[in-house]
Image (cartoon, grey):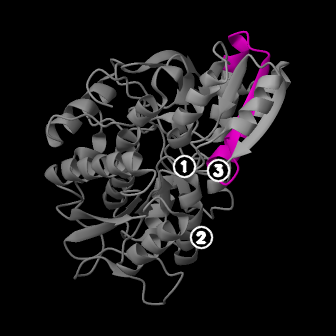
């Protein structure tokens, strides 16, 4: 968001307390000459770094429906690499960030990942969307390249990840229950659910919300579906209105949620509380939804007005390197965090005098413990690649998103 908007950015690593910006002391990290090279045994061999540069890859939605997220994600990643290189890189070796565009499409995300692997990157970062990340995962597993997801919250992303797949954001197994508890604590008892049936993120989020809301004693009075690109929700909303809900949970992306909110109000459901997940996070939600979406609530990752030094240093550095602008979505911080976590793992490899290659880097990423991030500490050690993190609920206002409440996993997931 712009100045004055409360950013909520997931899993973002703060520059202020980042130890990885200090150059590595051990000059004996192994490697040959000539840059980063792909393994010589073909598919499934990973890649190794040599020479004076280390190639890492990023896949982001720089065009298409998720463009606001992808552009911010790339800006955050570029910032992390720039600061890291300015601090000396890895024993003087510079990191080169190679970026490919998924165009917000799963198959193009897959081909973008294949291109990066062919270019010899030792790790791939991305994507902002779960459906795209699922396709990228297949390439990463085949090539034995670590993949660090930025904003992909679907729980399946890290399943059967073979020690290669991780993320810096919470999962829908948390944010669904967070919003269910928030709704129940707010006094809502009759909630309808609107799900994008073709979007893995949306179907997974709705599933976890519904399950937890029922466990708490709430009633799901209607479950309706739509798909991306749909603009007329009249039929679904007529059926929803007939159930007399006191809340509607919309688990899709901001693109459809804004117009849907307008139609909900036009249908006469003026007092119904509107809720959703981090897929709402974009200034376009407000421009698309207008007054209809104001007063809605959604789950997100961090808050730009927190006084923690990690948060404020990230925002200061982002502005200084982006013509005075702040990221418009949480993905600026998430892209930064995912990249910074990878860079920290690279630094640890060099300090331990281990060869910098995909296999060693994957192991080091999964050994991450207590890594200081904008949204809080990230620990992957002892997990399947999913960090245990708090989640925030924010309220939609005319001028941005305002912090409402923070939830720790222990209080949300407790029976």
Quick check: can you spot residue 341?
Answer: no
Residue 336 position by quadrant: top left
Please tell me which of labels 2 and 1 falls first in the chain.
2
Crowding near pointer 1: few (<14 within 10 Å), some, many (20+)?
A: many
Crowding near pointer 3: few (<14 within 10 Å), some, many (20+)?
A: some
Residue 106 position by quadrant: bottom right
Which residue appears farthest toward the top when viewing the image?
A: 187
Q: Is residue 345 left or right of residue 53?
A: right
Considering only vertical position in the picture, is 275 above or below 85? above
The kind of secondary structure element at disc 2 is helix
Quick check: can you spot residue 279?
Answer: yes
Residue for point 33% across, 28% down: 311
Residue 281 x, y percent position in the rendering? 46, 35
Closest to the camera, between mark 2 and mark 3, is 3
Membership of 312 in magenta stretch: no
Q: Which residue in the structure is indicated by mark 3? A: 227
Residue for point 67% across, 18% down: 268
User: Which mark identifies residue 152?
Assistant: 1
Alpha carbon distance from label 2 to label 3 = 24 Å
Q: Which region of the structure is painted magenta?
A: 181-209
The kind of secondary structure element at disc 3 is loop
Alpha carbon distance from label 3 to label 1 = 19 Å
Q: Is residue 375 left or right of residue 317?
A: right
Please tell me which of labels 2 and 3 falls first in the chain.
2
Q: Which residue in the structure is indicated by mark 2? A: 138
């Amino acid at each position: 968001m712009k100045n004055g908007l409360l950013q909520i950015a997931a899993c973002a690593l703060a520059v202020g307390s980042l130890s990885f910006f200090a150059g590595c002391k051990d000059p004996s990290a192994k490697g040959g000459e000539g840059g980063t090279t792909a393994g010589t045994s073909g598919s499934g061999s990973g890649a190794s770094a040599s020479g004076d540069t280390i190639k890492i890859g990023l896949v982001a939605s720089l065009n298409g429906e998720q463009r606001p997220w992808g552009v911010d994600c790339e800006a955050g990643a570029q910032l992390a690499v720039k600061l890291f290189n300015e601090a000396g890189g890895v024993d003087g070796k510079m990191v080169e960030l190679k970026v490919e565009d998924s165009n917000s499409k799963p198959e193009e995300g897959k081909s973008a990942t294949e291109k990066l692997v062919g270019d010899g990157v030792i790790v791939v970062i991305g994507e902002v969307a779960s459906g795209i990340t699922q396709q990228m995962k297949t390439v990463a597993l085949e090539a034995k390249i670590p993949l660090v997801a930025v904003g992909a919250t679907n729980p399946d992303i890290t399943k059967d990840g073979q020690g290669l797949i991780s993320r810096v954001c919470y999962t829908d197994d948390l944010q669904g229950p967070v919003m269910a508890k928030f709704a129940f604590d707010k006094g809502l008892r009759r909630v309808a659910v609107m799900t994008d049936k073709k979007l893995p993120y949306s179907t997974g989020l709705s599933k976890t919300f519904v399950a937890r809301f029922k466990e708490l004693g709430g009633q799901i009075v209607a479950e309706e579906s739509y798909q991306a690109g749909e603009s007329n929700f009249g039929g679904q909303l007529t059926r929803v209105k007939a159930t007399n809900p006191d809340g509607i949970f919309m688990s899709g992306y901001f693109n459809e949620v804004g117009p849907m909110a307008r139609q909900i109000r036009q249908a006469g459901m003026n007092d119904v509380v509107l809720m959703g997940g981090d897929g709402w996070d974009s200034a376009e939600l407000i421009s698309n939804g207008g007054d209809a979406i104001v007063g809605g609530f959604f789950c997100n990752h961090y808050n730009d007005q927190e006084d923690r030094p990690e948060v404020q240093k990230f925002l200061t550095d982002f502005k200084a390197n982006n013509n005075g602008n702040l990221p418009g979505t949480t993905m600026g911080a998430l892209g930064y965090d995912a990249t910074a976590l990878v860079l920290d793992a690279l630094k640890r490899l060099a300090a331990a005098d281990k060869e910098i290659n995909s296999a060693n880097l994957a192991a080091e990423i999964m050994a991450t413990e207590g890594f200081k991030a904008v949204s809080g500490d990230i620990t992957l050690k002892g997990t399947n690649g999913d960090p245990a993190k708090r989640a925030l609920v924010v309220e939609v206002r005319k001028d941005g998103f305002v912090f409402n409440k923070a939830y720790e996993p222990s209080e949300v997931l407790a029976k």
